[in-house]
Image: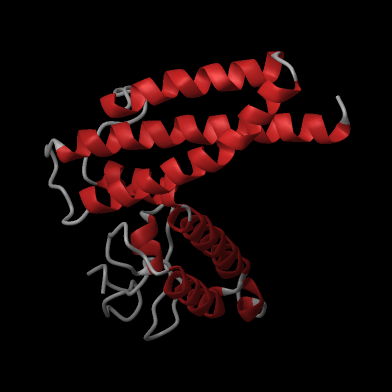
Amino acid sequence: MATSNSCSDCGKALESVLCCAHCGSLQQISEPQDPFLVLGLEPSFAIDSKALDRQLLALQRRMHPDFFSGESPEIRARAEHNTAELNSAHERLAAESERAETLLARQGGPDRESERQMPKSFLMEVLDWNEILEDGRDGDAKAAQAALDLGSELLEKRAELFAEIGRLFDPMPSPGDSTLLDIRRALNAVRYLDRALHQIEELRLENSTGK
């Protein structure tokens, strides 16, 4: 069990901070919650997507607003609020980048504003990729095709970065560990790749429509 929080009604330990599996009570929450506590999962980068989806469905069944249609307006509103919180938490943990960002913040690692650098080994490749993308936008058909072909390479690099991020999170770094800086820089590289892949997709759409 990922949380030792107790139910406000029956006092038993909660699997999820949103609802009690023992008495069915919806818990009152105000501020956005840690998504791992919402879904009742141990903090980890390595998450089985199918297990994550099963946990989402199990919790949705317990707190779906339709199940509380005969309750007071306050309880119905709580069901809607907690369901929205559940869906938001699932989205954050289902996406590798958001899951890594969540873990990094939990461990007190640097955020995007305080650390903007990427891994040094990545920088020379970035210069080459930027040149290919710029030529693809402004050059001839051959240059545009080279930019489109770059997409496969960037997707492979993205997968490599997430594999490295997974290794850096196992075991979980302690607050202040230098590994957290390495994770931040790897995530910055992922953000660069996502932007570049978006540019390639825009170029692909322009070519397909003849613009």
Does 171 appear above or below 68?
A: above
* 167 on left or right of 163: left
Does 12 appear above or below 79?
A: below
Q: Quadrant of the C terminus?
A: top right
Q: Using the rendered image of the protein, determine whether residue 125 is visible from the camera's viewpoint.
A: yes
Q: Quadrant of the N terminus?
A: bottom left
Residue at point 26%, 68% (across, down)? 2
Q: Please, which residue is most extreme toward the top here? A: 138
- The number of numbered badges drawn on the structure is 0
* 54 on left or right of 46: right
Percent across and percent down for residue 158 are 44, 43
Residue at point 56%, 68% (across, down)? 79
Percent across and percent down for residue 107 are 21, 45
Percent across and percent down for residue 190 are 42, 37
Residue at point 61%, 69% (across, down)? 76
Percent across and percent down for residue 152 are 55, 43
Does 133 appear above or below 3?
A: above
